[in-house]
Amino acid sequence: MDSHHSDPEEFYVKQDRIGKGSFGEVYKGYDKRTQKTVAIKIIDLESAEDEIEDIQQEIQILSQLDSLYVTKYHGSFLKGSHLWIVMEYCSGGSCSDLMKPGVFREEYIAIIVRELLRGLEYLHSEGKLHRDIKAANILLSANGDVKLADFGVSGQLSGTLSAKKNTFVGTPYWMSPEVIKQSGYDHKADIWSLGITAIELAKGEPPYAELHPMKVLFLIPKNAPPTLEGPFSKTFKDFVSYCLQRDPKDRPTAKDLLKHKFVRMAKKTNYLTELIERHERWRAEGGERAEEEDRRVAEEENSTDPEDLWDFGTVRHAGTVGRAKQNPVQVSGPPLTWENNGSIRSDGSSASGRHSFNHKQRSQASYPNSVAAKTDLPPLPPSNPATPRKQDFQGTVRQTGNGLSREPSDEYDDDYEEPEDVHDAPPPSDDDLPDTTMLDSVVLPAIASLFPRVSTQEARVALSALQRAFTDAERIIPGVTLELINEIVDSVEHVEEEH
Amino acid sequence: MNFFKTKPRTPPDLVKGLRDALPRLENTVPGSEQRRKANEDVAKNLQQMKSMLNGDGEPTPELIAQLSQEAYSTDLMHHFLLNLHRLDFESRKDVVQIFNSLLRRQIGSRFPTVEYLNGKPDILFTAFKGYENEDIALNTGMILKEMLRHESLAKLLLHSEQFYMYPHYIETTTFGISCDAYNNLKETLTRHKPMVADYLDKNYDRFFASYTQLIMSSNYVTKRQSLKLLGEILLDRANFSVMTRYIANEGNLKMMMNLLRDKSKNIQFEAFHVFKVFVANPKKPPQIETILRRNKEKLLAFLQNFHNDKEDEQFTDEKQFLIAQIQQLK
């Protein structure tokens, strides 16, 4: 079974492109052996921002899921540097596509929400969090079955089902207060996102959709939870308010919510085919042309799209397209600084950080030369020691490691190996970190997004210095970036109020 | 699955239930009613065993100790692995959890399951061999990973003939499994540093002959990842003497110089982090210095243009340092 040498194209036929995520493209295709339609996500590992280990970690998690309510994973194959991830295909499309002709009526939402709750009940019982519930990640099969798209068809690899990920990749509208504050969160974060998604399905947009995502990051933890307003039943409004409680402990579990009247009364899933039919009619009537038009406009406006700020992948892609062609040596293109600075990524998996002479594992007593260039073997430029933040992080991991002492390299495993963690204890990884989210997820990516817009090496060096300055400040004064941004946002708000 | 929780069964009951049901998997035809029934019995017992080990309900150390003893005395763990491919999807996951709960069991500073497995090397090797069956490879990979946390078990694998199956497993499986095998290879080689350093020192030739296959693989991921791991191994203080040997070999230097010009930028970059060690060595053996000197001008021109788009200060510093070192060659 030399399947490794086998080309995925021996088994699958790739057809039309059906989507484009920041990490790659998604195609419709079919399995030659069974003629079954599949979705194929193709990621170029050579230009993917994620470490291969992180991608593999996600795949491993996916491979352990088997539920009617989650899109099924079929396998992954390598072709050159392109990874093909083959998933179940849902011909109905995503709920955000299906909403294009108009929002859903309450009775449909009840069905979708019930199915989502079943999916979440499964995921949570497996010790997994989804962390990216939103209409765009909810797919419908031809006969109306509702599936949580774990990743791929509509979203990117990161931010979903990940054992340890920067959840700020994506937009913050669906995020719960505790996720934004990084104060420790568990499966109840998905319940919040479900509540937001219910509002999205009813109104067409999540709360605060009109605001800049960065501002929303402050409003969600600061304001009272959103409520569902408008001509909806009391039961529906009541259901949403159950999901959207500030204290995660007050939010019911998926299992509890399945007993709520709103979903208990919901009809069978095959009613949802009406939404698919409605979308088809809308397309037939020319809706798609308008949509295409919208998309074109959106693509043209790409650089001003606020979501762009959070999209590591897209930026990165733009920088690496056309690279490594004929001349492998002389490569130009925007720098990828946000990856190269070993200290900015909390998982410590930055490419250079891993290899440099002062790699975290060897940083303390390491190899004579990393201390100084005077000792006897390879003298190399001295470099900064591991940041305190990393040390803290390792400490957290050890604490939750079932009494076993863990090495830093274990950081990622725990979510899927120890499902019990999610239920009773907070998830092992990100929680007890100092609040560096603002740095890692907002400020550094924001600066990174400026790189493609400057043209000189000098300008790039300046931006790079700015990133380092923030990183250093954060190391010395943990939480300072968050405070700074809070100040800025507050002053912006004051100005607005004065108007 | 609460409906199984009705009557609490004793550890011997559970283990006996499994030891009875597992052979029935072997002796029945897939798809038959008997097989279905056997799978059901296995699943039921596994779930009870899992919840007992998780300490659901009243967690009693006595029950867990009794359960472990029963598992050891009946070779249950080995039978789990031998029958894993016959279990259904969820049961396989349960086996992984049970296995790993047992492995983590600790009394004071002792790990009773690890001690048990030390005396039963076949169990570790059966888990390792899981890479040969793609249906269960990721499950056995998780078990193997948990085993490799323990030095004695990692040593058992490292010192075995089977260890040299890693390249085969990495090379002949699909992406997900290949990566898992690579991760466990990395685990075997980086977790217990002094033990590994001693092994590499004593088995230097065989190990690196085998490892070079991975670096020269035609598979993009294998090549990139094994190069990266090589850099980590060489730069580890514990492997100082191995590194000294590695960077004295002109074949290794040539290989890295060629990889610096690989068509993949990531591979070039990983190669740089091995190449730098050859150059930074203040006591370069003559054969190394000769090659570097012979290529002095080409290397200087090459490095001046090497990954100039990287905004990584440390990388830039290292590169400048290498350029200075090469310029000094006379």
Image: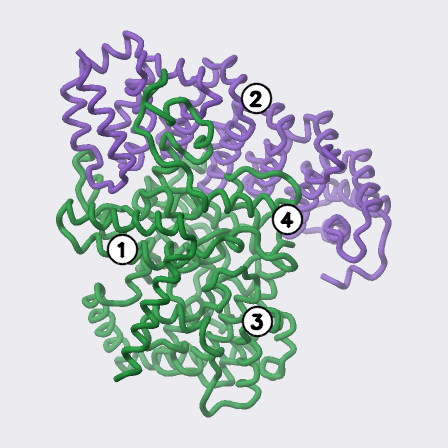
Chain colours: A green, B purple
Per the rendering, the mark at residue A247 is 3
Disc 1 crowd rating (10 Å Cα; few below 14, some 14-19, many 20+) is some
Residue A458, image x, y percentages: 15, 46
In the picture of the structure, the residue carrying the numbered disc 2 is B195
Left or right? Give the position of B86 relative to B316.
Answer: right
| Residues at marks 3 and 1 on the same chain | yes
> Disc 1 vs disc 4: which is toward the camera?
1
Q: Label 4 is placed on what type of residue?
A: Lys
In the picture of the structure, the residue carrying the numbered disc 4 is B93
Q: Label 1 is placed on what type of residue?
A: Ile
| Residues at marks 1 and 4 on the same chain | no
Per the rendering, the mark at residue B80 is none
| Residues at marks 2 and 4 on the same chain | yes
Residue A376, image x, y percentages: 36, 15
Q: Quadrant of residue B198?
A: top right
Q: Secondary structure at mark 1?
A: helix
CA–CA distance in space, label 2 to label 4: 31 Å
Seen as rendered, the residue at the extreme bottom is A231
Identify the residue shown where x is 37% and y is 28%. B217
Left or right? Give the position of A31 relative to B99.
Answer: left
| N-term-proximal mark, 2 vs 4 | 4
CA–CA distance in space, label 3 to label 1: 33 Å
In the picture of the structure, the residue carrying the numbered disc 1 is A447
